[in-house]
Image (cartoon, helix red, strand yellow):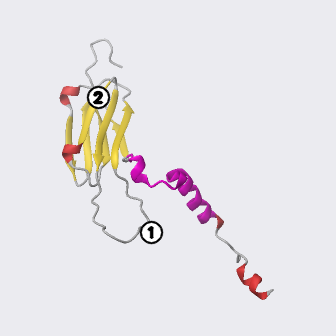
Amino acid sequence: MTKKQDQLVSFPIHVSSEGERLFDEMIHRPWAFCREIRGWDPSVDLRENSDCFLLEADLPGVKLEDVSVAVENDDLVLRGSRVLEQTHSHGHFHAMERSSGHFLRRLKLPESVDVTGMKAEFCDGVLRVTLLKAKKPVGEEK
């Protein structure tokens, strides 16, 4: 009887942190597939001011030549890929959360932009793209 008592769950248990971990596993790694199989979605911010839109995308480990930005049918489209270096030759993973593969992010632009004035800079793994708003014909100003 004493042996069974030692195997019972001790209270208080931390249900909230365990619940969050299980939810994260269920949402981000369904059926135990690692993220590398599914590709990845880099985090992006799209801001607007009176003159332009500014996209900032976190792209750590991505090479400049592996990224493209375009405007297609009033959508801002970010495409690219990231390959993680495979430096391990033996052993096994205890955690594998860094993602690699192809990505595609499509963001709807609420206004037309002047694609000829698009500017991009890539520094320290962050892509910054500036898109000037298209000039409105006289009489259509707000």
Per the rendering, the mark at residue 94 is 1
Identify the residue at horizontal 51%, vertical 56% (top origin).
Answer: 32
Amino acid marked by disc 1 = His
Amino acid marked by disc 2 = Val
Residue 74 x/y as whole percent: 34, 25
Relative horizontal placement of residue 44, taking residue 113 as reference (left or right): right
Decide: is 69 above or below 35. above
Q: Is residue 26 magenta?
A: yes
Q: Nearer the viewer, mark 1 or mark 2?
A: 1
Decide: is 21 above or below 103. below
Identify the residue at horizontal 31%, vertical 11% (top origin).
Answer: 139
Image quarter for residue 55? top left
Residue sitting nearer the eye, 57 or 65: 65
Residue where numbered disc 2 is placed: 71
User: Tag 1, which secondary structure?
Assistant: loop
Q: Residues within 10 Å of mark 1 (few under 14, many from 20)?
A: few
Relative horizontal placement of residue 10, taking residue 51 as reference (left or right): right
Where is the C terminus found, in terms of image quarters?
A: top left
Image quarter for residue 130? top left
Where is the N terminus found, in terms of image quarters?
A: bottom right
Q: Which residues are magenta?
A: 16-41
Say whether marks 1 and 2 touch (CB < 8 Å).
no
User: Tag 2, which secondary structure?
Assistant: strand
Q: How many marks?
A: 2
Residue sitting nearer the eye, 8 or 20: 8
Residue 2 x/y as whole percent: 78, 88
Q: Is residue 52 magenta?
A: no
Identify the residue at horizontal 29%, vertical 56% (top origin).
Answer: 84
Residue sitting nearer the eye, 25 or 31: 31
Residue 49 x/y as whole percent: 32, 35
